[in-house]
Image (tube, rainbow, N blue to C red):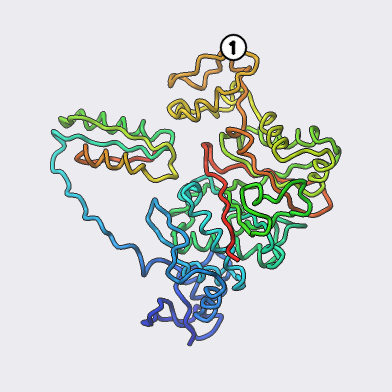
Amino acid sequence: MTTAPFRESAAARDGVDVPDPWAAIEACYENGWTDGLPVVPPTEKLVDAVLAAGPWKPGDVLLHEPVRDRAVTAEKAAINAVMAGCRPEYFPVVGAALLAIGDPAFMLHGPATSTGGSALMIIVNGPVSERLGLNAKANLFGPGYRANATIGRSLRLVLLNCLECRPGVLDKSTQGWAGKYSLCFAEDEASSPWEPLHVSRGLSAGQSAVTVFAAESGHNVLSHGTGDPEELLTCFANEMAGLGSFSPGRSVIVFAPEHATHLRRAGWTRLQTQRWLYDHAWRTLADLKRGGKVEPAFFTNPELTRWLYQDTGRGRPPVPDTLVDPARVREGDELVRVHRGLGPDDILLTVGGGDAGGHSAFFPSWSRGRSVAFVTKEVPA
Amino acid sequence: MTRILDPTLRPAAPAVTAARASRPKRFDGLTIGLLANGKSNGMALLDRVAERLAERHAIIEFVRVAKTNASAPVLEEDAEMLAGRCALVITAIGD
């Protein structure tokens, strides 16, 4: 296949001129503007329609990445949203998600570039979900819904095009995963045993919101055999305690409606569930050492040293290791319980998926360290 | 012809607002900053660099700063301290 010729435009808005839609798609590839899939060519008309659907002026900065001092304006965001395939009315959600990942607490530089290869998870709450047709049900993380697919994709295109997170160059993900194309879904608020996620994070039910997280690939938590909350949650805690993903970082649990129903029937609160999971998702310090998960750097970071030794169980607190041979299993290490995360608040609970099936998901944070915070932002009406 | 718009920041890359610092011609008599980026072995790498430099030059002092998180920018107060005390700063990632 040959690429149709295009030329640099001398007009006020930077771009290229193309003779037809096919040439436009090819020009986007030629310029390195895609995630590998074809994009919708961002014509001025489409971009202006998207910009007009949000409350921002073209020059408003929606995302500032401080490590490399890059500012993404609403106009650039709109261009990428068009390319991702968004309808104009999706743009307030895209803009809110950009504001969220630009929050200093999110520390975007790591999720955008690190070997950990995280996806930018967007959980949508409030009236906007139904209005835009965002999927909260069957095939929650899979294909089939334009709003889910294109809102999530918009963020990735912004990272590729505006922050230059090119694979293998600035994006050093060792493996990455498919969620890096797009990972956006609505909470199934009707199936949740609890208040909507954004309400638990301080907004009102009438508001719409996005909550973002930098997620390692999801782990399926399969349980069809019990309705007892503790038996059910044992499966989750076991998955959270797996050595491969074990870290002091945060977690997202997406309960399938079936699992959520068990918790609702038993009257388990959000906090009770978070606390139970935190209390039971642990490995002994000896286990961590045997798996090579205890690094010298943990002992020069007071937060991580506390994390290792904050639950000494019934045993006498051991003398913390020093920089010398921290991986050696010492007397007392079998009694020290190291939990996933620093506390129950580090476990974000949400609900989504098809009504049939006992398949939930655990998304660990992406790094071996503390990683990033959850950030929630209101979607402008 | 239809115009499609550039989605990148390339045409509007931020202007360089700071002048490049002058390069010292010799290391003798200098105080040198060592800024580890927050990865596990960044400071270990810098310590080795410092050892080598100290063997070859009459360095007055090394000032060490380790970021606690590799994803975050260096703290303003640390950057100012390094700028105030050091003739040059060496930074390293060490995973």
Which residue is at 20% across, 28% downward? B55
- The x and y percentages for residue A326 are 49, 21
**Image position of A336 (left or right of B9):** right
Asked if A290 appears above or below A120 in the picture, the reply is above
Which residue is at 57% across, 63% downward? A94
Q: How many marks?
A: 1
Q: Mark 1 lies on which chain?
A: A
Asked if A191 appears above or below B40 in the picture, the reply is below
Q: Residues within 10 Å of mark 1 (few under 14, many from 20)?
A: few
Quadrant of the image containing the C terminus of chain A: bottom right
Q: Choose between B22 and A62: the one closer to the eye.
A: A62
Residue A25 at least partly seen: no
Quadrant of the image containing the N terminus of chain A: bottom right
**Image position of A261 (left or right of B52):** right
- The x and y percentages for residue A299 are 46, 25
- The x and y percentages for residue A320 are 50, 18
Give the residue type at disc 1.
Arg
- The x and y percentages for residue A108 are 48, 50
Q: Choose between B49 and A54: the one closer to the eye.
A: A54
Residue bearing mark 1: A316
**Image position of A144 (left or right of A174):** right
Q: What element carries label 1?
A: loop
Which residue is at 53% across, 54% downward? A100
Name which quarter of the figure residue A146 lies in.
bottom right
Residue B87 at least partly seen: yes
Q: Choose between A35 and A279: the one closer to the eye.
A: A279
